[in-house]
Each structure stands twice: as C-alpha cells, then as structure tokens.
Amino acid sequence: MRLTAILAVFFLFQNYAVAQKKVGCPPREMLMQSLKDADMVSVWSGWSDRGHITEIWMNMRGEDTRWLAVVHLPSNYSCVVDQGIKGTFQPQGKASI
C-alpha cells in the first residue's frame, strides 16, 4: 500500500514536470515568435537577482490591454509566469495602489 502511494506521487510529479516543460516553458525562440504572432510587444525587461531575465509583454490593441510576464531561464527556456488584462503604464513616481 505504501509503495503504491509513493509510486502515485512520483508519477504525478513527473507528469507535471514533463507537462510544464512542454507547455509552460517552451524554448525561448518558440515563445518569442508566438508572442509576436499575437501582436504583443516587449515593454520592459530586467535582470533578476535570481539569475534570469524577467520581461513584460503587452498587446495594446482593443479595450482590454493584455499583458504577460515572461521569465527567460539560463537553460534557453522561457516561462509565462503571470498574465492579465487592463495593463497600464504608471507615471514615474506615482503609486497606483
């Protein structure tokens, strides 16, 4: 019984890792082309203290401005870590919250 539970947990995490690699973190060039095809443009990027580049992409067409946060890993994979709508640019020195 214990062995069955251990194997179930092992395969659950292994399948999650494989799915994340295939869907959530594709090769950098593949994700960049997909974002460009969706009319998104890079509006901000910066080096993370954790050793990767974080980049914000936006599609400013339409009523609800879409945005994506992308993390570029040293392994040449990129992950979409967050996304949303109604993105706005804040004037320098102004708090939005």
Image (cartoon, helix red, strand yellow):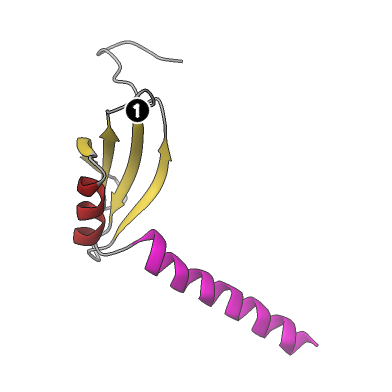
Answer whether residue 21 is magenta in the image: yes
For the residue labelled by badge 1, is the local secondary structure a helix, a strand or a loop? loop
Front position in the image: 68 or 10: 68
Relative to residue 31, is residue 36 depicted above or below? above
Relative to residue 45, is residue 18 depicted above or below? below
- Residue tagged by mark 1? 65
Q: Quadrant of the N terminus?
A: bottom right
Relative to residue 65, is residue 48 depicted above or below? below
Q: Residue at x 52, y 75 (%)?
A: 15
**Residue 6 position in % (x across, y down):** 68, 82
Q: Residue at x 40, y 59 (%)?
A: 24
Q: Looking at the magenta stretch, what is its main secondary structure? A: helix
Which residue ends up furthest to the right in the rendered image?
Answer: 1
**Residue 16 position in % (x across, y down):** 52, 69
Front position in the image: 85 or 73: 85
**Residue 25 position in % (x across, y down):** 35, 61
**Residue 2 position in % (x across, y down):** 77, 85
Where residue 89 sits, quadrant-wise, is: top left
Residue type at mark 1: give it: Thr
Q: Residue at x 20, y 38 (%)?
A: 42
Q: Residue at x 39, y 68 (%)?
A: 21
Where residue 66 sits, quadrant-wise, is: top left
Taking 6 as reference, is 67 left or right?
left
Magenta part of the protein: which range?
1-25
